[in-house]
Image (cartoon, grey):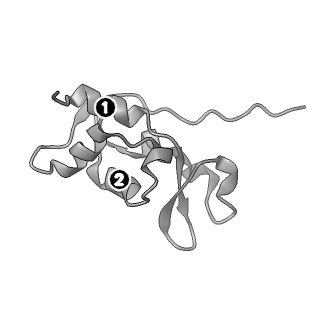
Amino acid sequence: MSITSHDICNAADQLKGLVGFHLKREVHIVRFSEDSFGLDVAEDSLQPCSEFVWREVGEGRMALCRAHLAFLLAQHVDDRLNITEPLRLYVRRTDLPEIVAERVVVTPARPAEVQ
């Protein structure tokens, strides 16, 4: 069975978890709840892993970033992040260019405030 770019993009959209930027350590960290980041992570830096792996390349196009996927793989929590074989293969295949696609950035849904 061959893995297509469509399979890889679908696998990227199925990633779970959140990435935030730790201000004091100046590194990205992964958590599985927005509440678990703490005060050293700016709320506006939080993004779903499924969006973290994409980077803008201009004109409404985004590239599936191997470096960001490699960062997630380095966490060694593949099952919790839902990293599947299409993404592992994509990271290994550095002989092929990154996938570039037209897509819209998805922002995390914030719970409605109770009044």
Residue at 24 percent of width and 49 percent of height: 91
Disc on the earlier residue, 1 or 2: 1
User: 66 left or right of 14?
Assistant: left
Q: Amino acid at mark 1?
A: Cys
Crowding at dot 1, Cα within 10 Å, few <14 / some 14-19 / many 20+, comes out as: some
Locate residue 3, reporting x and y percent: 20, 31
Q: Please name the residue shown 14% across and 43% down the image.
A: 97
Q: Position of residue 69 (x, y in %)?
A: 34, 50
Residue 57 in view of the camera: no
Count neighbours of disc 2 (C-alpha within 10 A) and say few if under 14, some if 14 to 19, many if 20 or more. some
Residue furthest out toward the right: 115
Q: Nearer the viewer, residue 110 or 66?
A: 66
The location of residue 26, given as percent across then percent down, is 49, 70
Q: How many marks?
A: 2
Which residue carries the number 1 mark?
A: 9
In the picture, which quadrant includes the N terminus? top left
Q: Secondary structure at mark 2?
A: helix
Residue beneath the point at 57% across and 73% down: 24
Q: Which residue is mark 2?
A: 68
Mark 1: secondary structure: helix
Placement of the C terminus among the 4 image quadrants: top right
Side of 39 relative to 63 (left or right):
right
User: Foreground: 56 or 21?
Assistant: 21
- Quarter of the view holding residue 39: bottom right
Image side of residue 76 versus residue 22, left or right: left
Tell me: residue 72, above or below residue 64: below
Does residue 111 appear to the left or right of 64 in the view shown? right
Q: CA distance from mark 1 to mark 2?
A: 14 Å
Tell me the kind of residue under disc 2.
Answer: His
